[in-house]
Image: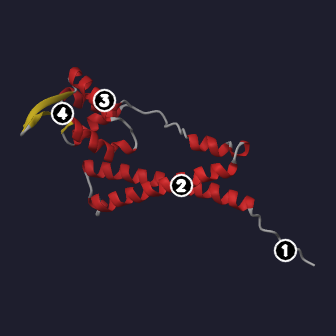
């Protein structure tokens, strides 16, 4: 996937000025497809040159006019084609997983602190996702269309964070058990 496709999705949901789009992106698609503000502006300019988006200049009081981007017919066709294209299986790539595997070759106690910190980060993100779900989708059974799609992607994020927390808990518990083995009572 290219950033262009992520921006086409975001602009299909709602046309926006560049700064507004970058802020919305950070709060939604940015959770699983990172882009800086500079990248977004560069790609928007390229998408405008390619005819994938239209731009409307909107006057503002006391400020320069802002450019509001919307998906053009050409951009909508590109998005439709891209959505219908099969994707390869996602590759799992995790620096933390490599560190966990290599723990025996370094300072295990330091790595366990890294794992605990990562677990805390995943817990914080999970709580954030759950708050978004409760606030934005209080009746998920009644969702359709774009709102249903957005909710289901959020549910995927929740499940992913639950996976990370459970896996890191398993790792920490196994190392805690190895460091503090339970001695079997000897029978007489």
Q: CA distance from mark 2 to mark 4?
A: 38 Å
Quarter of the picture containing the N terminus is top left
From the viewer's perspective, is residue 52 above or below residue 14?
above
Q: Residues within 10 Å of mark 2 (few under 14, many from 20)?
A: many
Q: Left of 81 or right of it: where is 17?
A: left
Residue 81 - label: 3
Q: Residues within 10 Å of mark 4 (few under 14, many from 20)?
A: many
Residue holding disc 4 = 69
Question: Reading the chain from its start, which is encountered first: label 3 or label 4?
Answer: 4
Please tell me which residue lies in front, 167 or 104: 104
- Tell me the SS state at disc 3: helix
Q: Secondary structure at mark 4?
A: strand
Q: Quadrant of residue 8?
A: top left
Q: Quadrant of the C terminus?
A: bottom right
Question: Which numbered disc, 3 or 4, marks the residue closer to the eye?
Answer: 4
Q: Which mark is in front, 2 or 1? A: 2
Residue in front for this viewpoint, 90 or 42: 42
**Image location (x, y in percent) of residue 122:** 48, 53
For marks 2 and 4, the one nearer the N-term is 4
Where is residue 44 drawn, in percent x and y? 25, 28
Q: CA distance from mark 2 to mark 1?
A: 35 Å
**Which residue bears the numbered disc 2?**
119
Q: Which residue is mark 1?
A: 185
Residue 57, x across and y down, in percent = 10, 31
């Amino acid at each position: 996937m290219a950033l262009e496709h992520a921006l086409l999705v975001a602009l299909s949901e709602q046309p926006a000025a560049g700064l507004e789009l970058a802020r919305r992106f950070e709060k939604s698609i940015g959770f699983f497809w990172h882009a800086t503000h500079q990248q977004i502006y560069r790609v928007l300019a390229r998408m405008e040159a390619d005819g994938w988006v239209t731009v409307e200049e909107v006057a503002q009081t006391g400020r320069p006019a802002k450019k509001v981007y919307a998906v053009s017919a050409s951009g909508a066709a590109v998005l439709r084609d891209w959505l219908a294209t099969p994707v390869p299986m996602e590759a799992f790539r995790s620096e933390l997983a490599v560190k966990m595997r290599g723990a025996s070759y370094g300072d295990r106690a330091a790595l366990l602190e890294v794992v605990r910190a990562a677990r805390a980060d995943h817990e914080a993100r999970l709580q954030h996702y759950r708050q978004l779900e409760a606030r934005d989708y209080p009746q998920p059974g009644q969702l359709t269309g774009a709102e249903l799609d957005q909710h289901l992607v959020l549910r995927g994020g929740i499940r992913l964070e639950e996976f990370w927390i459970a896996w890191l808990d398993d790792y920490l518990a196994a190392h805690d058990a190895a460091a503090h083995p339970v001695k079997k009572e000897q029978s007489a």
